[in-house]
Amino acid sequence: MSDFPTEGAPPFINRRLTLTEWRQYIAGYSFGNLAPSRLVLHHTYRPTQAQWAGLRTMRGIQRFYAGKGWTSGPHLFVAPDGIWLATPMSRIGIHAGVGNGSSDQGWYSIGLEMVGDFNANRPAGPVWDLSLAVMGELSRRLAIAPRQLISFHRDYTSTKSCPGWSVSKDWVWQSVEAYLQQTAPPAPPPPETGGITPANELLLEQLYEESFRQKSGGQGYNPAWAFHQYAVANNLGLPLAPSRTISEGGKSYDLQPFARDTLYTEVPNWGDVRTLSQLLGGAIPPDGLGRRLLNETYQAGGATFRPDWAFHQFALLNRLGPPIGTSLNLTVDGRQYAYQVFATDTLYNLVPNWRDVRTLSRLASSSDPAEVRLREALLAATYRATGQTYRPEWAFHQQARTMAIGAPLSGSYRISVEGSSYALQVYALDTLYNLVPQWSDVRRMSNLAATQQPLGAPMAAPAAVERMVLGGVETPPPGLELRLVRYTPQSQACSDRAGRTIEQVILHALPGPVEASLHAMTRLGARFATHYYLSLDGLIYQLVDEALAAWHAGIASADGFWLNLNLTSIGVALERPADWPEGPVDDTEPQLLALRWLLQQLASRYPLSPSALLLWSSLAGSDADAAEGLPLSVLREALVGAEKDRYVD
C-alpha cells in the first residue's frame, strides 16, 4: 500500500493507528527496493507517559528535531493512546547513529520509540502491549526472527542506557516470540545493570549538549546522529561548525567539521560516515570532493585554505582540525611572531622563519622564562581568537594548558542538573567542569564518558541468507551449498581505495566464536575488519564491500617502498578455535571448499595471479602458523584457473 502523506520538517506522518489498523497497515506495507533488516528499540525518557498529549506532543518532538537540523527521525512512537507514525518506514531514519543504516551498504533499521522512562521500571500496559505488536508484526512482515531483527539503542553508543536498564534483550526477544506463537509471555527477569547511572547519564547528556551546541549553530548534541556518534567513539573532539549540505560532482553530501577531522556522508546514507583525512590520505588535491571539503572546513573557521602556506600544510599533516580565524602577528620580548589558532593547537613561527613551524602545546610545561612569556602571550591570543579572556589564575585555564585540549569554544558558565550546580568551560577536545563551589576539583567530560559502558550483546547475523552469487556464477562446488550473508550493519572500518586496483588476497586467522569475531569487526569504532569472514562450516559473511578498502592489512615494505595494502587487497578472515594456534583445527573441508570457490570468483573479476594469495602472518612476521590446515598450492590453483578464464576469447 502507498504510505500516508507527511507534513512539516523533518517529514513526519503524524498519524495515530489502533492495534487493528497497525496490523492492516504493516501487512500491506510496501518498503520499495530496499527493506529494513533491523529494528532499534528506544525509550523517549522525556516525554514520559504522563506528559504525552498525542498530536501536540508529536509535533513538539518534530519541532525539536527540526531545531537540531535533523532531516529525518525515528519511524514509530508507541504511546498510551496508540501507535504514532513519524518518518515513513520506506525511508532511512535518524535515531541510532551508525545503527541507522545506509542505502549504499544495502541495509537500514526501523527506529521504534516507546514513550516513557524505563531505567527503573519495566514497560507495561498499553505501551508495552502495542510495542510487542509493532515488533511482532514487523518480524512477521519482514520474515526475520526477533533475535536477528531487534537491537537496542545502547548497542550503538556508550553514553545511553536506552531503551532503559529495566529492559533486557532476552526478555524482549522471548516476549516477541511469545506474541508470534500466541503463547504465555515469559516471566520478567531482573533488570539489567550497567555503568550508566541515571544521575551520571543526565549530567553527561547535559555536558554533551552544552559542548556540541557552542559552534554548531545551536544544533546541540544528537546521540542518534551518526556524525556525533562517530566523533564521540573516535575521539574527534567537538564540532566547530553546524552540519550542512553541499553539492559536488552531481551528488549531495552532508558535512560537519570537528576538532580533529571533518566528517561527511553522501545523502541519504546517514550511517555511512567518512572522514576527510582518509579521503585526502595526506595529499592536497587540486579539485574534486576532497578539495571542496577542505575549503569548506577552513571557511567554517573563518579562513581561506592556502596550500602553499606552511601553517596549513603542517595543520593538515598533523590533523589539527579547522582554523579559528586567520594568521596574525604578535611581538614578545622585541621579537615578531606569526601565529594561527587551530582547533587542537596554535601554530607559530619567528618571522621570517616561515617553514620553522612550532606548536603552543610544546611550551605547556616549559619553565624557561623567555618561553613562559611567549607561551602566555600565545595563550592570551588563542583565547582572544574565540572571544574569551585568558585567566592564568583560573583552575580551568591552568588545567586546559597542561591537558592540551585545544582552543576554548566558550567562556566559563554554570548549569543546573537535578538540583546541583556545575561550572563548565568547553574546549575543542574536551569540556572541563566542577561541582560548585569546588573550584579546584576540575573534572573532564571524557573521563565521565569513559566510565559509561553499554551492555550491548554481540549482534546476531541477519536472518536473510541468500545463495552465493559472485561474478555471475551461481553453481557451487559439488556437495556444498554455498551461502552468503551480507552482515548488517556493515563494518565502518574501511575507506575509499583512492583509485587503486585490487592486486592481492590476504588471509587472516581469527581465533574465537563466529559471533564475537563478527561483532568485533562491525561494532561502533572498530579499527579492523576484513571484506569476508569464512566460518568453519563454510558460511561466507561479507562485512565490507569490495569497492572499499577494508582496514585489515595496513602498511608493508617491499623493495624499499612502503605500501598501503588496504588499498590494493581483499581481506579474508578464517574462523579458528579460541585456543588456536595451540589447539588443533578440526574439520576444515567446508571452509576450504568455500574459500577455494570464493578465490575463483575474485580472480574472475580482478587481475590476481597465484602469487597474489598472501598470509597476513607472513607479512607481519608472526610465528603463528596461519597456514595450518590450508593447502596453499591447491588454493593458488583456484587463481590459476580463473586467471586462464579471463584471457579466453
Image (cartoon, rainbow, N blue to C red):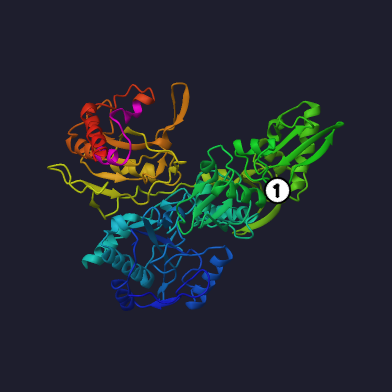
Label 1: few (<14), some (14–19) or many (≥20) C-alpha neighbours in 10 Å: some
Whether residue 604 is in magenta: the answer is yes
Residue 316 in the image: above or below residue 223: above
Above or below — where is 442 with respect to 615?
below
Asked which secondary structure carries label 1, the reply is loop
Dominant secondary structure, magenta: helix
Query: Image height check: is 201 above or below 500?
Result: below
Q: Residue furthest left?
A: 479
Count numbered badges in the picture.
1
Residue 72 in picture, x, y percent from top left: 48, 65
How far across and down, in percent of the image, does residue 500 sit?
A: 43, 38
| Position of residue 389 in the picture relative to residue 318 (left or right) | right
Q: Nearer the viewer, residue 195 or 180?
A: 180
Which sits in the foreground, 466 or 391?
466
Location of residue 375 by image quarter: top right
Instruction: Looking at this view, name the residue that lies furthest to the front.
Output: 649
**313 left or right of 510?**
right
Q: Camera-side residue: 181 or 576?
A: 576
Q: In terms of image quadrants, where is residue 348?
A: top right
What's drawn in magenta, residue-wise? 599-617
Quadrant location of the N terminus in the rendered image: bottom left
Q: Position of residue 631 (x, y in %)?
A: 21, 28
Work out whether residue 458 or residue 318 is closer to the camera in this orientation and state it. 318
Q: Is residue 285 within the magenta segment?
A: no
Q: Position of residue 407 (x, y in %)?
A: 68, 44
Where the C terminus falls, by quadrant?
top left
The disc labelled 1 sits on which kind of residue?
A: Ala
Query: In this image, 629 relative to 332: left or right?
Result: left
In this rendering, does residue 184 appear at all? no
Relative height, residue 100 to residue 261 (above, below): below
Residue 357 seen in the figure: yes
Q: Which residue is mark 1?
A: 303
